[in-house]
């Protein structure tokens, strides 16, 4: 798939890139080569290839899921500025203007 300079100009505009004419020619060629390579890869037959998450068939060693820290919730909430029903209350920092449809 070959890109035109006009297409690359549009892509550059959308990405807010300011390309000069020399860069435009260079990137047009490079992006076209990348898209050609992707097109070539898409033509590869992968019907009998199993999905691969890791090149080695091993399991990750995981630690036991056990609590290792003491429960200090009451102590932390006792020094909090505002708490209600076990939740920390904080000032609203984002305001939205809701538009009715």
Image: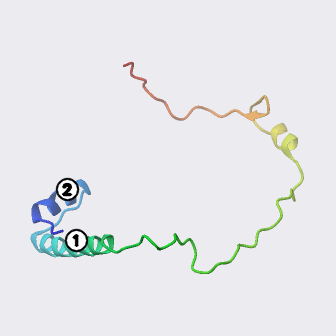
Looking at this view, is 25 or 38 the one in front?
38
Q: Position of residue 53 (x, y in %)?
A: 56, 71
Q: How is the image coloured?
A: rainbow
The quarter in which the C terminus is drawn is: top left
Q: Quadrant of residue 15?
A: bottom left
Q: Position of residue 44 (x, y in %)?
A: 34, 75
Q: Residues within 10 Å of mark 1 (few under 14, many from 20)?
A: some
Looking at this view, is 94 or 7 the one in front?
7
For disc 2, the marked residue is: 13
70 with respect to 35 (left or right): right
Furthest-top residue in this view: 100
Where disc 2 sits, the SS reads helix
Looking at this view, is 58 or 72 the one in front?
58
Give whichever of discs 2 and 1 has the lower sequence position: 2
Furthest-front residue in this view: 48
Checking the image for residue 12, the label placed there is none
For disc 1, the marked residue is: 31
């Amino acid at each position: 798939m070959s890109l035109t300079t006009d297409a690359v100009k549009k892509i550059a505009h959308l990405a807010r890139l300011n390309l000069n004419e020399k860069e435009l020619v260079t990137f047009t060629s490079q992006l076209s080569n990348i898209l050609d390579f992707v097109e070539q890869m898409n033509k590869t037959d992968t019907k009998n290839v199993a999905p691969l998450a890791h090149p080695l068939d091993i399991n990750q060693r995981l630690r036991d899921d056990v609590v290792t820290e003491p429960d200090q919730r009451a102590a932390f909430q006792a020094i909090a500025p505002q708490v209600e029903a076990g939740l920390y209350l904080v000032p609203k920092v984002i305001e939205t203007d809701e538009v009715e449809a």
